[in-house]
Amino acid sequence: MNYYTATLQAIRYHDYMKRRSIIFLLCLWVGVSHAQVTLDSCRHWAQQNYPAIRQYALIQQSTEYTLSNAARAWIPRVVLSAQATYQSDAANMSDVWQAMGLGDMLSNMGKDIPDMYMRPFQGKVQVDVQQNIWDGGMAAANKQAAQCEQQQQTAKIDVELHQLDNRILSLYFGILLLQEQSQQLAGTDSLLRSNLARVQTMYNNHIVLSSDVDALTVEVLELQQKREQLQYSLRAYREMLSMMVGRNLSQTELVLPQAQELSLKETNIRPELQLLTYQSDHIASQRKKILSYSMPQFSAFAQGWYGYPTLNMFEAMQSSRWGLSGIVGVRMQWNIGAYYTQKNTLRQLDLRQEQIQVQEDVFLYNQRIQRMQENAEIVRLKQALQSDEQIAELRSSVRQAAETKYENGTITISELLQTITNEDAAKSARAIHQIELIKATYELQNL
């Protein structure tokens, strides 16, 4: 008896633990299926998933290499060279002395004239070292140009990300609007079906005509068709948003941002304006580079070589031995030809600067117009919301009264359907205006 009792308790415990496991898995599935996602999360995920985001690191690395090369302009430049030549003719001091009569004079004195001439075979291994003393500001201009180029390329990516943020904003609120419309249609469908059941009962009792049942049935079918089309659009929007954020959002709930979470910052700088500023800075750096081309440059240099002939020409004429030689000095280089085109080049930069200023003025002009439009839209939606609640309540009361009147036979089915349609439109307008108001505020914030 105790054995069977223990076995029965073990079976019951096993069933209990199995039920708990099933309940836990169901709760976990429900939690995953109804996970909530915010607008800020979608923005963050979209930026991380955007391919151009990887260019930030590439631009940084490229700029570091350019700056490193610009800084190495002050490192001494060393050039190693070697050459070997054969000359068809070379200097011969013995012939010169004979032509001057020195040969006969030395012979009368009992002395021989030494052979002094350059050998036709010559060669050397040479090392040249040059150290910049002042480069006319070219290295500093190159560094500034590299930094401006980095800022300009980074700002272009910022512009792309801002445009991406606007697309995410449109998709996110588009999904919220479609969801709200779907919920409103679901409520209207339930209302129509309840009225259809009531009219069907009245028809069965021979109180109304079959045409009334058909009219409500047609409305239910048409509404079902609208709901299906709306679900297709909602699915397409979710798929686009999922692709842009790199996550599956088909079973997630998008949270409607609250109005009190919004903060309008007038000090925010649009990335388009920042890009124009960096382009202007880049032109300024180009101006410095052009001016540095026409400045004199000073450098110190040293040359050393091992070969023949050496700097001691008389010794080289007496012997073909190789030897060490070297010179040091200071060099000045001034490219006067840079002045020929400098004026026209600087004028071109001035024209580009003026074009950037025009682009900035046009952008600010359009932005002011968009800001006025957004502000006007926000005012319109706020005024509409003030009466939407009252209109929806009144439409609901009218619809309830119409249902009673229809049952009493004082109005037709068409009049009843019109009141249902008016109530649905009023509730939809109220919900849509609420979402559109928050969307308009976010769009104004992005401006």
Image (cartoon, helix red, strand yellow):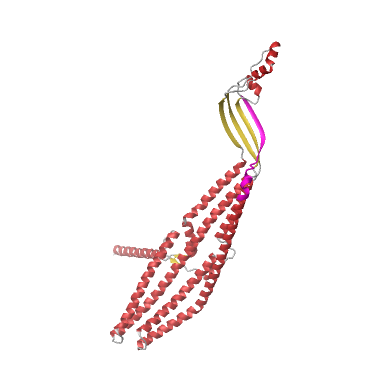
- Tell how many labels: 0
Q: Nearer the viewer, residue 38 or 416?
A: 416
Query: Which range of residues does the magenta coloring cover?
Result: 323-345
Residue 171 in picture, x, y percent from top left: 45, 65
- Residue 336 drawn at (x, y percent): 64, 42
Q: Is 135 situated above or below 250?
A: above
The location of residue 362, given as percent across then percent down, is: 56, 63
- Residue 220 in sight from this viewpoint: yes
343 displayed left or right of 376: right
- 379 is within the stretch colored magenta: no
What residue appears at the point 52 percent right and 75 percent down from the top-left corner? 380
Q: Nearer the viewer, residue 193 or 319?
A: 319
**Taking 342 as reference, is 249 left or right?**
left
* The C terminus sits in image quarter: bottom right
Q: Report whether 211 appears left or right of 431.
A: left
Q: Which of 379 and 423 is in front in this view?
A: 379
Question: Which residue sits at x=42%, y=70%?
Answer: 179
* Left or right of residue 392: residue 107: right
* Rendered view: 123 above or below 267: above
Q: Can residue 287 be seen in this view?
A: no
Give the x, y percent position of residue 57: 52, 51
Quarter holding the N terminus? bottom left
